[in-house]
């Protein structure tokens, strides 16, 4: 009993959902702020690092924060979105250290976003995500779409005492489209 209380959690997948949604929802506005004044962001953050194409890299940083945040929130392509965020946070942490040293006030938010993205990459999106649904539907059961839209008739004969009437009986599938018998002939 103590093992289940201290070491097992029934809320593990819910915790993954909360981590993904809060990280994405709190980070997305940073990407929109970059887009609001892309030239200022490029001058303040990209040019001091002497990186080539500062405006292009600024757009890439904004797109990774906005796109990655939406991917985390929806749970669709979660690890890819978290990787984009991790890359952006790595450059941001490098910039903060180069320009200001180990200033905890500048690094704390960046480190939290970095840790969240890194955890999501390692642990995955959890069950409450589009990635999980796609995996369950298309990979675990590759004929799932066919089983929904194409109704195969499986005729089974029931042995009866009356030998002159043996009618074929269609078996219902558990995932039949509603009204499929009504719409089909």
Image (cartoon, rainbow, N blue to C red):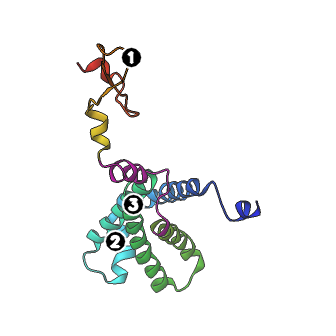
| Residue at image point 37% right, 32% down | 173
Instruction: Choose between 32 and 85: the one closer to the eye.
Output: 85
Disc sitting over residue 42 in the figure: 2
Q: Is residue 134 magenta?
A: yes
State whether residue 175 is above or below residue 119.
Answer: above
Which callout, 3 or 2, points to the residue nearer the camera?
3
Classify residue 162 by image quadrant: top left
Total labels drawn: 3
Q: Quadrant of the C terminus?
A: top left
Q: Residue furthest left?
A: 185
CA distance separating discs 3 and 2: 20 Å
Which callout, 1 or 3, points to the residue nearer the camera?
1
Labels 3 & 2 near each other (Cβ < 8 A): no
Residue 84 placed where, x, y %?
A: 37, 67
* Callout 2 crowding tier (Cα within 10 Å): few <14, some 14–19, many ≥20: many
CA distance separating discs 1 and 3: 66 Å
| Residue at image point 29% right, 41% down | 145
Disc sitting over residue 147 in the figure: none
State whether residue 98 is above or below residue 154.
Answer: below
Magenta stretch in the rendered image: 122-142
Classify residue 15 by image quadrant: bottom right
Classify residue 54 by image quadrant: bottom left
State whether residue 55 is above or below residue 104.
Answer: above
Disc on the earlier residue, 3 or 2: 2
């Amino acid at each position: 009993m103590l093992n289940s209380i201290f070491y097992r959690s029934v809320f593990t997948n819910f915790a993954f959902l909360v981590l993904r949604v809060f990280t994405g929802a709190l980070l997305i506005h940073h990407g929109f702020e970059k887009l609001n004044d892309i030239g200022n962001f490029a001058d303040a953050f990209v040019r001091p690092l002497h990186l080539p194409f500062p405006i292009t890299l600024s757009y890439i940083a904004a797109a990774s924060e906005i796109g990655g945040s939406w991917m985390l929130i929806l749970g669709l392509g979660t690890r890819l979105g978290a990787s984009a965020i991790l890359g952006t946070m790595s450059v941001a942490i490098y910039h903060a250290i180069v320009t200001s040293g180990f200033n905890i006030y500048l690094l704390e938010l960046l480190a939290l976003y970095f840790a969240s993205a890194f955890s999501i990459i390692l642990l995955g999106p959890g069950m409450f995500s589009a990635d999980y649904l796609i995996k369950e539907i298309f990979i675990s059961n590759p004929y799932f779409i066919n089983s929904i839209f194409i109704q195969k008739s499986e005729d089974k004969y029931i042995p009866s005492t009356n030998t002159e009437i043996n009618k074929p009986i269609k078996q219902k599938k558990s995932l039949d489209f509603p009204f499929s018998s009504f719409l089909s002939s």
